[in-house]
Image (cartoon, coloured by chain):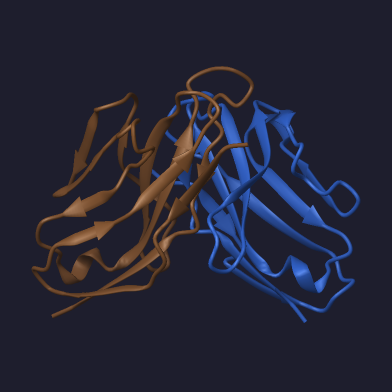
Amino acid sequence: EAGVVQSPRYKIIEKKQPVAFWCNPISGHNTLYWYLQNLGQGPELLIRYENEEAVDDSQLPKDRFSAERLKGVDSTLKIQPAELGDSAVYLCASSLLRGYEQFFGPGTRLTVL
Amino acid sequence: GDSVTQMEGPVTLSEEAFLTINCTYTATGYPSLFWYVQYPGEGLQLLLKATKADDKGSNKGFEATYRKETTSFHLEKGSVQVSDSAVYFCALSYAGGTSYGKLTFGQGTILTVHP
């Protein structure tokens, strides 16, 4: 069974540029999560989806970050415009249902210059 | 709010040494506790978990016991291998309420095992 797929794995951009990350969860998983992992820190939840509905986005900086999960499958996280402080690893995870084991993708490492 | 604190790293051991990685937590309720492992270039994987006080989670020779009285969930392994080199994260989550299913992680501990 394929795991959570994320792309790109690495992204380098100039500040003020837009950037987007893509996540394909495990087939059949209802719940999808985006986490932010700063260097030397544990992951922090940005947003959680149940199907296509964002049910917990309290930690998402909505002035520059946006996310969508069309048709309740793939998801995209976007930053526009990117700032130097956005350099981090962006992790996607999915679970069968809320509260079930979360399976993580390998992450996208973003560097903002 | 809830938080998880792990021992400072990195931890460097020789093969077959005994491993302990300390984890303590602060919680408003009665969470489940987890250890995740992240191997180089891979996503986080659930290593073990415990859902209530005095439960012991175990997997791949690793063990951790949920200690409510000391609010701790220390990870141990009797004999580490080079292949155990990874980053280890302690985390908590609730089985109900508004934070149901939300994972709160510690900062991670880097483990390096030398032959």
In the figure, is residue B87 to the left or right of A8? left
In the figure, is residue B39 to the left or right of A100? left
The structure residue drawn at horizontal position 13% and vertical position 49%, both measured from the top left corner, is B61
- Quadrant of the frame with the N terminus of chain A: top left
The image shows residue A113, relative to residue B105, as above or below, that is below
The residue lying furthest to the front in this view is B69
Colour chosen for chain A: blue
The structure residue drawn at horizontal position 8% and vertical position 68%, both measured from the top left corner, is B16
Colour chosen for chain B: brown
- Quadrant of the frame with the C terminus of chain A: bottom right
Residue B25: % across, % down: 45, 42
Residue A84: % across, % down: 79, 74
Rendered image quadrant of residue B43: bottom left
Residue B30: % across, % down: 45, 24
Residue B87 or residue B2, whichever sits in front: B2
The structure residue drawn at horizontal position 74% and vertical position 43%, both measured from the top left corner, is A59
The image shows residue A93, relative to residue B17, as above or below, that is above
Residue A35 or residue B71, whichever sits in front: B71
Rendered image quadrant of residue B20: bottom left
In the figure, is residue A62 to the left or right of A5? right
Residue B63 or residue A32, whichever sits in front: B63
Residue A35 or residue A39, whichever sits in front: A39
Rendered image quadrant of residue A21: bottom right
In the figure, is residue A98 to the left or right of B72? right
The structure residue drawn at horizontal position 52% and vertical position 51%, both measured from the top left corner, is A5
